[in-house]
Image (tube, rainbow, N blue to C red):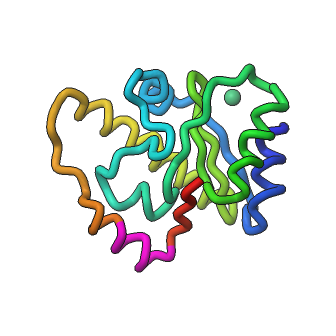
């Protein structure tokens, strides 16, 4: 509850918040080289278009009020966070949008795991910048 409330409190346009304990996202979150600022690597445009940048937060005991504080600390700059060793949380304008976005997060985490140990051609920073501009993606830098 503190987690969901924190999203509603800091994202005025959030009409729904969804949370999963999804397999691939959790697997990616516990790897030692997981990137906190950009949890999802730039594999496809769709994750960026639906989620923006996804922040990996550390592990919190489920229900710990500190989870809400951590989300509030992002000051509404992220629509999606990944709780390490737990699961993703995504806010959207309605339930359908939030569900579609969290499915994209899980699919992208699966792709990232499939590609581990290889040298895939990721989207370039210029390609990501183009998506951010054209789709008016919130791009928090905290
Ligand atoms: Zn949970």
Which quarter of the rendered image does ligand 1 occupy?
Answer: top right
Q: Is residue 27 above or below residue 14?
A: above
Q: Position of residue 55 (x, y in %)?
A: 55, 44
Horizontally, residue 9 falls left or right of residue 31, namely right
Horizontally, residue 18 falls left or right of residue 9, namely left
Q: Residue at x 25, y 29 (%)?
A: 116
Q: Residue at x 73, y 68 (%)?
A: 13
Horizontally, residue 61 falls left or right of residue 90, namely right
Magenta segment, prevailing SS (helix, strand or loop): helix
Task: Name the residue at the front extreme.
Answer: 142
Q: Is residue 1 above or below residue 29?
A: below
Q: Quadrant of residue 20?
A: top right
Q: Quadrant of residue 59?
A: top right
Image quarter in which the N terminus is found: top right
Question: Magenta span has 6?
Answer: no
Task: Name the residue at the bottom extreme.
Answer: 134
Q: Is residue 18 above or below residue 129?
A: above
Q: Quadrant of residue 47?
A: bottom left
Q: How many marks on residues?
A: 0
Q: Is residue 59 above or below residue 40?
A: above
Q: Position of residue 79 (x, y in %)?
A: 62, 56
Q: Position of residue 126 (x, y in %)?
A: 27, 68
Part of the protein shown in magenta: 129-136
Horizontally, residue 95 falls left or right of residue 88, namely right
Q: Residue at x 31, y 30 (%)?
A: 113
Q: Position of residue 138 (x, y in %)?
A: 55, 67
Q: Residue at x 79, y 39 (%)?
A: 68
């Amino acid at each position: 509850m503190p987690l969901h409330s924190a999203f509603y409190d800091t994202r005025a346009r959030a009409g729904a918040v969804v949370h999963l304990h999804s397999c691939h996202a959790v697997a990616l979150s516990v790897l030692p080289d997981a990137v906190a600022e950009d949890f999802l690597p730039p594999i496809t445009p769709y994750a960026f278009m639906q989620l923006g940048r996804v922040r990996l937060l550390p592990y919190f005991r489920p229900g710990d009020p500190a989870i809400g504080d951590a989300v509030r600390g992002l000051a509404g700059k992220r629509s999606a966070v990944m709780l390490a060793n737990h699961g993703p949380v995504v806010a959207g304008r309605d339930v359908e949008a939030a569900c579609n976005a969290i499915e994209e997060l899980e699919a992208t985490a699966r792709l990232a795991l499939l590609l581990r140990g290889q040298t895939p051609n990721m989207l370039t920073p210029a390609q990501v910048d183009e998506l951010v501009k054209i789709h008016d993606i919130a791009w928090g830098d905290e």
